[in-house]
Amino acid sequence: MQKEQSMRVENLVKNFGSGESLVSVLDGASFTINKGELIALVAPSGAGKTTLLMMLGCVVEPTSGGIWLGEEKVYGNRWLTHNSRKIRRQKIGFIFQAHYLIPFLNVLENVTLVPQTNKVPTKEANAHAMELLKYFDIAEKAYAKPSQLSGGQNQRVAIARALANNPEIILADEPTAALDTERSISVVKMLKKIATEQNVAIIMVTHDERMLEYCDRVMKIENKKVVFE
């Protein structure tokens, strides 16, 4: 069965500065990420992991190249939309090291925030959010505030929030960095399950080589190029 493309990148370049102060971070990255894959992104500090992730998330503008989300080209030497925030809301999910839940909103409201910003009707957004909360075995906390949840529960809510807009891809920036080994493995196994069962691509930045065995592929930045193991 042919794999379905989640993201494609062609000849992506990122420089900072100009002239004698020019710093090249990426020089011609090209790759394809398919739905259902959990990809580990690893590289030494300063090699450009976060910069690459933020370009893929349409947060940082590349210097040149092309980016496709699904079959839609969103960047071709310039943003092909006047509203990159709309692209992020509709096509991309983010998971961070900290959960960044809004403290004065309950769990359900946190998960439905992005869909409702995308004009999804409240009833539909709530129904989808409850499905996700049931999937993560946390539906009984739907009307609790983040302060009433454990750290692990808040993390599950944050992952549910990342899935709430049915994204083409989820970008996870070191989601296990603050966890011990047992909890880190649990989170990575959960991300793998999500990728497979929800048919969504996930790119996870990690420094922990013990997590790599749970990923489908390992993406590295070497000599300003992206290579796969």
Image: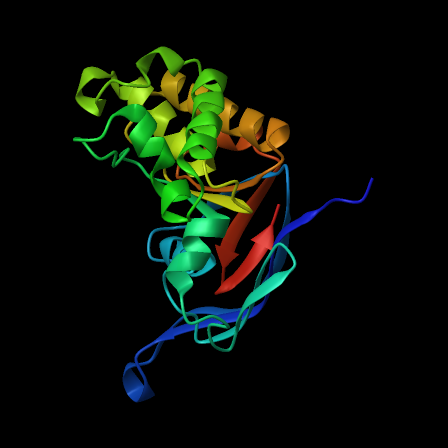
Outermost residue toward the bottom?
Answer: 19
Front residue of 5/27: it is 5
Image side of residue 2 versus residue 149, left or right: right
Q: Which residue is drawn at 46% across and 16% down?
A: 134
Q: Where is residue 129 in the image (x, y as percent from the top left)?
A: 43, 28
**Residue shown at the point (43%, 76%) measured from the top left:** 63
Q: Can the viewer see residue 57?
A: no
Residue placed at 58% from the left, 38% from the top?
Answer: 200
- Residue drawn at x 30%, y 87% as measured from the top left: 20
Quarter-of-image position of residue 116: top left
| Nearer to the camera, 85 or 5 | 85
Give the answer, above or below, for where 211 lies relative to 204.
Answer: above
Residue reaching furthest right? 1
Residue in front for this viewpoint, 144 or 15: 144
Residue 167 lies, in percent from the top left, at 52, 44
The location of residue 113, given as percent across then percent down, is 33, 39
**Front residue (pair 151, 181):** 151
Give the farthest residue toward the top: 140
Q: Is residue 29 above or below residue 92?
A: below
